[in-house]
Amino acid sequence: MQSPAQNFSALTTDLYEVTMACGYFKAGVTDHDAVFHVTFRRNPFGGQFAVACGLATAIDFLRSFRFTDTEIDYLTLQRGNDGKPLFDSRFLDYLRGLQLTCDVDAIPEGTLVFPDEPLIRVVGPIVQCQLLETALLNIFNFQTLIAAKAARLCLAAEQDPVIEFGLRRSQGVDGGLSAARAAYIGGCAGTSNLQAGQRFGIPVSGTQAHSWIMFFENEREAFQVYAKAMPNNCIFLVDTYDSIEGIRHAIEIGSELRRQGHELIGVRLDSGDGAALSIKARRMLDEAGFMNAKIVGSGNLDEFMITDLKRRGARIDVWGVGTKLSTGQPDGALDGIYKLGAIRPPGGDWQYRIKLSEESAKTSIPGSLQVRRFYQPDGRFLADAIYETAHGILEPCEVVDTQTADKTTIPADTPYSDLLVPIFRSGQLVYETPDIETSRDHLRKQLSCAPPEILQLNDPQPYNVGIERSLYELRSTLMAHAKQQAKRN
């Protein structure tokens, strides 16, 4: 199983999506097609990349999309401010018979992505496209955020395993499942979440909490009883009272385990000076003959704390990261958006649409969009160009930065790949969803091909991504026209 068993329904949406759908229905434009894109405006966490994630969940949602009788009955109960039904029966009957017929393209999970690039493109009847907005944003915003956070943590930890520990503070049970899944794709080695482990095949990890230690009269007794109960799962939490004494007690019980044919897995440090304590713990464990015992570090960690602890020589082997990973701190949300790029009346041509803003970053990109990633001869990323599918890309390609208008010329015959791939055609799934290990491996390859300077935690440099020149010119023309129209109106 690939995605969280969310309680998705056609009502996994905001009310205004349905009121707009009703408006389209009453305006008689349900036969008009539209193209929408999920994009985001800003890289999370002050970094220079994000990680596409959530596609498998979105596929599950789209495959099951329909309005049930129970959901229609609920909509029947909604009232306007005059006390009369908000939705008339003809519209509700239309929803009852609605079946997804959209074409959907998306960037595979585990791909590095950047602001303004479409993570998903939806093309189809305007009502269907509109009704999908909220759920798609919910899925992609959260999982892309968490996968990016996990990737940053794993980069900071270098080759050390990072375990996701955040279920107790995640945003709900469904949020905990989504976070564990996204964190694993983002590079984490496992999770403490058993339900996520069972559903997605993620390795699970965990031993004991402070309450176990506190239940017994003393720490040594707590370790001893636990070792008797779980001799093949002994990572002792040593900081309940005094970390150094806790390490000594762990060594004593570890010696008893060894005499019984078992081996101490390690110790966990959850508070205090992680660098100094881990150095001391490593020395004590080695001197006692437990050279293979692991030291697990936890306690409100993030990528910057891990980097600092490593700089100070910490001897931590495994990092347990909870709250700041599973809740996406400090950002908490990716600012993903769902914008209309074009409409098409029956039998007509596509008509471009653009949203203006006083903030240039909030001005949308018109058309039906694709992302082309160019590569250096050694396979490393060179630049990304967002282009309009009907126009294509002329060679040599000119990539224009939307903020500075700086241009980069990509030589003809430069190797490339187009990132958005077909997922649904006419509402039918045409994509073979990779297993979670494949998506995780894909991210590893992506990171190995990315410019190192964009992956830095401190002072990362922006990746070269922009709009293909003809699309940039189209956008500029539409912006000028829209501004003139606004003045006339």
Image (cartoon, helix red, strand yellow):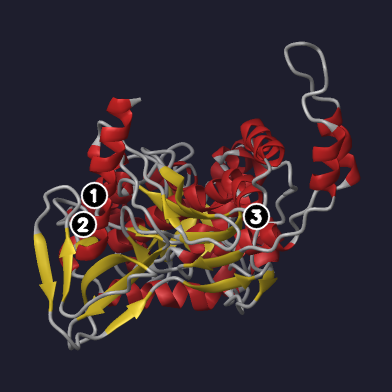
Q: Nearer the viewer, mark 3 or mark 1?
A: 1
**Which amino acid type corresponds to the residue marked 3 in the rendered image?**
Tyr
Tell me if residue 484 comes above or below residue 204 in the rendering.
above
Numbered tag placed on residue 226 in the rendering? 3
- Secondary structure, mark 1, is helix
Considering the image in quadrants, where does the C terminus appear? Answer: top left
User: The disc labelled 1 sits on which kind of residue?
Assistant: Thr
The quadrant in which the N terminus is found is bottom right
Give the residue number, with chain letter if any, for mark 1: 477
Which residue is depicted at the point 44% across and 48% down? 325
214 or 325: which is nearer to us? 325
**So how many labels did they put on this image?**
3
Q: Nearer the viewer, residue 95 or 429?
A: 95
Image-based side of 460 in relation to 137, left or right? left
Q: Secondary structure at mark 3?
A: helix
Q: Is residue 248 visible?
A: no
